[in-house]
Image (cartoon, helix red, strand yellow):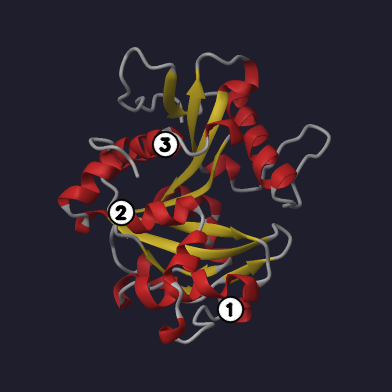
């Protein structure tokens, strides 16, 4: 969104975090999404443009697109991280939140609290394992403060659609990180996939965490929860869970991680 404030990053940094301000910015974000979600992970969709290598959908015009830019790079390659952000008003204009194709959000919609949906988070392969995710989260934190957001949520994905192979991490999330009733969204009935796939006493925490994507683990470190049930997205070649984070319940340590005042894990 034009006019959105930049995230606070040291002046001598070669990184910049800001929202997309032009069609060129948006196409750069969609190009990175293609490289990660389509070329790397085998996803697809009705509006994916393979000739131009753009991953896009009908919701893109309604989201703010948070960009992580490396000023040392040029052209569309300068965008090395992205996040999509949708507030309540934009969801009304779109007719729904993106997540509502997969999850019943009635408990959140009926809460009267300011909501923010996050999605399509990805980082260029050359920048994974470093500061990139933390910088994106610093940008999210600035956005949340500016718009006085109270609850963040969005689907996050495991690669692949074989739920048996994901039994340990899905079960661990269900038993250890299930959202409280007032935040417990639920996978839509027609596609509800149980997550308690192994008994609680058969959990292997090490195997579960090893099989959990970094983004999901980052939400958990911040005090996030998961909704009830997973959604198997076969066209996108993922198994999705819905993550929910109540910003008003962050403790001091979690708040420092979230705002970038401490090293992001």
Label placed on residue 180: none
Residue plotted at (59% across, 42% down)? 60
Instruction: Select label 2 or label 1 by which is in front.
Output: 2
Q: Please tell me which of labels 3 and 1 falls first in the chain.
A: 3
Q: What label does residue 222 carry, if any?
A: 2
Quadrant of the frame with the C terminus: top left
Q: Which residue is drawn at 38% across and 55% down?
A: 219
For label 3, count other residues whose C-alpha is less than 10 Å away and answer few (under 14), some (14-19) or many (20+).
Answer: many
Image marks 2 and 1: residues in contact by CB distance under 8 Å: no
SS of the residue at dot 2?
loop
Identify the secondary structure beneath mark 1. loop
Distance of mark 3 from mark 1, alpha carbons? 30 Å
Other residues around mark 2 within 10 Å, as few (<14) / some (14–19) / many (≥20): many
Question: Viewer-proximal residue, 119 or 106?
Answer: 119
Number of residues whose C-alpha sits closer than 10 Å to that of mark 1, classed few (under 14), some (14–19) or many (20 or more): some
Seen at 37% across and 40% down, the residue is 137
Residue 204 x, y percent position in the rendering: 46, 74
Residue for badge 1: 193
């Amino acid at each position: 969104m034009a006019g959105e404030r930049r995230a606070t990053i040291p002046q001598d940094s070669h990184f910049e975090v800001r929202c997309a301000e032009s069609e060129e910015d948006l196409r750069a974000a969609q190009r990175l999404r293609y490289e990660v979600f389509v070329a790397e992970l085998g996803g697809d969709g009705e509006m994916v443009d393979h000739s131009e290598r753009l991953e896009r959908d009908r919701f893109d015009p309604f989201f703010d697109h948070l960009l992580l830019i490396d000023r040392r790079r040029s052209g569309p390659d300068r965008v090395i991280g992205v996040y999509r952000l949708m507030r309540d008003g934009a969801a009304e204009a779109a007719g729904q939140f993106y997540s509502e194709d997969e999850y019943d959000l009635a408990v959140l919609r009926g809460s009267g609290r300011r909501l923010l949906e996050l999605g399509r988070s990805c980082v260029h392969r050359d920048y994974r394992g470093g500061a990139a995710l933390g910088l994106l989260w610093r940008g999210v934190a600035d956005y949340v403060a500016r718009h006085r957001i109270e609850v963040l949520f969005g689907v996050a994905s495991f690669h692949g659609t074989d739920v048996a192979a994901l039994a340990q991490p899905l079960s661990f999330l269900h038993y250890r990180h299930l959202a409280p009733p007032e935040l417990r969204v639920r996978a839509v009935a027609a596609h509800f996939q149980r997550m308690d796939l192994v008994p609680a006493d058969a959990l292997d925490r090490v195997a579960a965490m090893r099989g959990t994507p970094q983004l999901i683990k980052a939400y958990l470190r911040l005090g996030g929860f998961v909704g009830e049930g997973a959604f198997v997205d076969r066209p996108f070649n993922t198994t999705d869970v819905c993550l929910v984070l109540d910003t008003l319940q962050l403790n001091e340590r979690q708040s420092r991680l979230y705002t970038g005042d401490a090293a992001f894990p």
